[in-house]
Amino acid sequence: MKFVNALAVPLGVLGAVLTYLALTYGMFFIWAVFLATCMGVALGGSKEAFKNLIICGSLGVVLASVASLIILNVPVPLPGAMWPAIVVGATTAMMALAANLPIFGAIPATVIGYASTFAYLLSANKLSNETFMALNFGNPLVINILSIIVAAGFGLVSLNIAGKLAKQAVA
């Protein structure tokens, strides 16, 4: 069996299970899980790649959260969206600078964490101090990082099962 065909089995089954869990319990975002899983595969699909996904994706979540809190709590009298643009520019530059440390070298994973945090905050109208102070799954520091961790597990398990299925079909 071709690897891509074998991959359809764990992706379909685990994708369905994870979607059910996400929609039933709300402990992670299924869209963030699928995006981050793709990033882990793009980084190489190895245990090391998924470890980098967790570390760098979490850094992105933290940087986006810091940016959000600065935007919310540091009033700067600039016209329109100039202040948020400056804050986002500065924190995204920090992503690249952080990559000088090898542990933060997977910049695309950092971007996924950053982008998924703002996607949640802006699309769900959650950009508020209350969102960040909540000690629950509504806090992006909790739900986005948990989504990235779930994605790493999903990716590793899917690739492992697909590899075994593909080898069995050849044997």
Image (cartoon, helix red, strand yellow):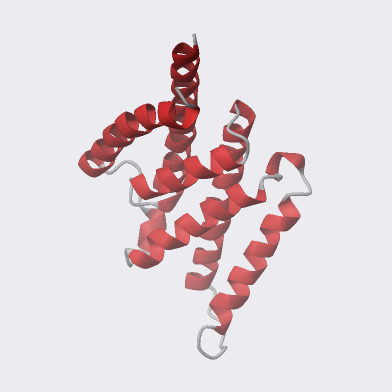
User: What residue do we see at 64% from left, 30% from top?
Assistant: 48
Task: Please tell me in which quadrant of the rendered image residue 126 appears.
Answer: bottom left
Residue extending furthest right? 100
How far across and down, in percent of the image, does residue 127 sit? 39, 66
Quadrant the N terminus occupies? top left
Question: Would you say 105 lies left or right of 60 here?
Answer: right
Q: Whole-percent x and y of residue 97? A: 75, 56
Name which residue lies at 57% across and 88% down: 78
Residue 27 is situated, as x and y percent measured from the top left of the image, at 32, 41
Find residue 14 and report its image quarter. Answer: top left
Where in the figure is residue 138, as x and y percent of width and height? 33, 51
Instruction: Give whichever of 17, 73 is nearer the camera.
Output: 17
Depth order, front residue of 59/41: 41
Horizontal side of residue 120 vs 68, given as left or right: left
Give the farthest residue toward the top. Answer: 171
Q: Is residue 128 visible?
A: no
Residue nearest the observer in this picture, 81 or 129: 81
Whether residue 120 can be seen here: yes
How many marks the image carries: the answer is 0
Is residue 23 toward the left or the right of residue 1 in the image? left
